[in-house]
Image (tube, grey):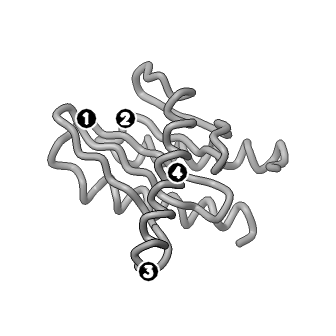
Amino acid sequence: MLSHMEKVQIQQVLQALIADCDEIQAALVVTVDGHLCAMQQRENYPLERLATMGSSLMSLGDTITAELRLGSCKNIISENEGGIVAFMHVNSALVLVTLTVQKNALGLLVAHSRRCATDLLKILGA
């Protein structure tokens, strides 16, 4: 389980992510069993439900890549009419979920999310 200090630091990393990339509308860190650890958003999105769905989606991605012997699942991208959602493993226990409403911002979303995941790993001592 995350300590109070780790949760505070995770929240700060998510705030920096939102501040550094105008295209990212929301970011959250969830456990692989669906519990919301921290979130930051520009608008009001139903992020609590997204936490559960994100963990389920990453579990499905892990199962698919294992079945196909493609190695570990690093991320899952959901491109939609209204934007893009990226689901990315931080480590074996946590998932980073990021959202943009800019349909042409996939590269920015993934690049900033990967950097954020690396920053989160530093906090967690991995």
The answer to which of marks 1 and 4 sits earlier in the sequence is: 4
Relative image position of residue 113 (x, y in whole percent): 43, 56
Amino acid under disc 1: Val
Q: How much space separates mark 4 and mark 3, taking CA atoms?
A: 23 Å
Mark 2 vs mark 4: in front: 4
| Label 2 residue SS | strand
Mark 2 vs mark 3: in front: 3
Q: Residue at x 50, y 74 (%)?
A: 72
The answer to which of marks 2 and 4 sits earlier in the sequence is: 2
Q: Report the side of 2 relative to 23 (left or right).
A: right
Residue under numbered circle 3: 69
On screen, residue 82 above or below 71: above
The answer to which of marks 1 and 2 sits earlier in the sequence is: 2
**Crowd class of label 3 (few under 14; some 14 to 19; many from 20; radius 10 Å):** few
Q: Residue 22 lies in what quarter of the image? A: top left
Q: Report the side of 68 relative to 94 (left or right).
A: left
Q: Residue 81 lies in what quarter of the image? A: top left
Amino acid under disc 3: Arg
Q: How much space separates mark 2 and mark 4, taking CA atoms?
A: 14 Å
Q: Residue at x 63, y 50 (%)?
A: 32
The answer to which of marks 4 and 3 sits earlier in the sequence is: 3
Amino acid under disc 2: Gln
Q: Using the image as rendered, state which of residue 34 and residue 63 is in the foreground.
A: 63
Residue under numbered circle 1: 101
| Label 1 residue SS | loop
Q: Using the image as rendered, state which of residue 91 and residue 43 is in the foreground.
A: 91
Residue under numbered circle 4: 96
Q: Residue at x 76, y 50 (%)?
A: 6
Asked if the residues shown at circle 4 and circle 3 are in contact, with their CB atoms under 8 angstroms apart, the answer is no
Residue 22, can we see it?
A: no
On screen, residue 85 above or below 89: above
